[in-house]
Image (cartoon, helix red, strand yellow):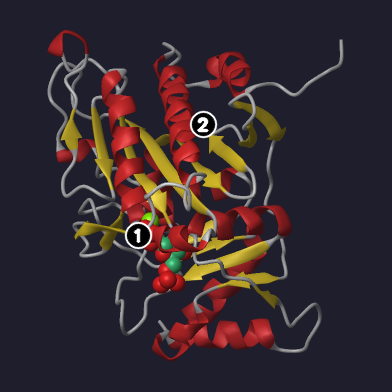
Amino acid sequence: MEERNKTLGEFIIEKQEDFKYSSGELSRLINSIRLAAKVVNYKVNQAGLVDITGAFGAQNIQGEDQQKLDVFANDTFMETLINREIVCGIASEENDDFITIKGKDECHNNKYVVLMDPLDGSSNIDVNVSVGTIFSIYRRVTPIGTPVTIDDFLQPGDAQVAAGYVIYGTSTMLVYTTGHGVNGFTLNPAIGTFYLSHPNMQFPKDGTIYSVNEGNYVHFPQGVKDYLKYCQREEENRPYTSRYIGSLVADIHRNMIKGGVYLYPTSSKAPNGKLRLLYECNPMAFIAEQAGGKASDGFGRIMEIKPTELHQRVPFFCGSYNMVNKAEEFMAKYV
Ligand code: AHM
Ligand code: MG
């Protein structure tokens, strides 16, 4: 028989013993995410055919206009996780507050909470550019059998049990880690199955790509300005190449494969940066570190930050290890 790649389902079963708490709950949870990802993928692919592009007509908690697909993706992930009674709580970038899920017999007996950005990069939807879903999974810290509280969600990234993203790109991939490396699975749309296509993904230690919204240059801190000038200087393997899609998932995914650094620093317009610690930065940081890369707020590890609020923003420097180090060196000059 011709050998074929493992499916994601097969991989999850095989790896179950790697999971810290191997009751199978985490495996079922990742399976639910896989299912929701396929539903969202189907919808994303219909953009242009049915009326799903454009604004929904409401704003989220951060005052950003919600897109129809933002709302669809949020509902799909929420419904899937709620219906399968697989988690005890969910927090989403699109919702003001976390929700509590009572689960089987209304006993609050599930162990995990999920934090997610259901459709990241939504400004790209209408122009047929890659978007993504980002998720982060923690074990609850409050006792089983009680409703979740905010403490279950405000955990540092280091406490993550699993994290990952789905990229709806030229092909659709699900990439995730449970703290044992990073693996990527590509969806075969004809049969609706994810196959292991990128085993043990690794950030090259060095790279030649920098990804930043350079339109904000004048608003950046001096350390970032100096680092960008360093990237552009004609020396050694520089100038680097500038590549910025404006979809975090796609920019990080490319840089993980090719070698590069992604920056969303503070600016005079956004004094805490733009990206959300819990929904975007922590899961991407977990992936980056598990793939041999690095994630920082410019001065220290993202995953050591103790969150104080659900929708907290943080500056984000993420990518090839040596490149993030170099950016930090420039930042340190202005402390
Ligand atoms: P979103 O969650 O509202 O989609 O915003 C996050 C996105 C990231 O995917 C992307 O890297 C960044 O915002 C782009 O922001 P900007 O347009 O300011 O460069
Ligand atoms: Mg986002």
The amino acid type of the residue labelled 1 equals: Gly
* Above or below, 255 relative to 186: below
Q: Residue at x 29, y 37 (%)?
A: 75
For badge 2, the amino acid type reads Thr
| Image quadrant where residue 174 sits | top right
Location of the N terminus by quadrant is top right
Viewer-proximal residue among 55 and 302: 55
Residue 195 place in picture, x, y as percent: 67, 28
The answer, for residue 241, to whether it is visible in the render is yes
Q: Is residue 153 above or below residue 180?
A: below
Residue 254, position as x, y percentages in the image? 65, 57
Please give the label number shown on residue 45.
none
- The residue singled out by tag 1 in the image is 54
Q: Of label 1 and label 2, which has the lower sequence position?
A: 1
Above or below 327: residue 140: above
Q: Residue furthest bottom?
A: 218
Residue 302: horizontal and vertical position, in percent? 42, 56
Task: Report the side of 324 relative to 60 (left or right).
Answer: right
Mark 1 touches mark 2? (CB < 8 Å): no
Which residue is at a point 50% across and 21% down the rendered structure image? 19
**Which residue carries the number 2 mark?**
178
Would you say residue 204 is visible in this rendering?
no
Q: Secondary structure at mark 2?
A: loop
Q: Is residue 55 left or right of residue 226?
A: left
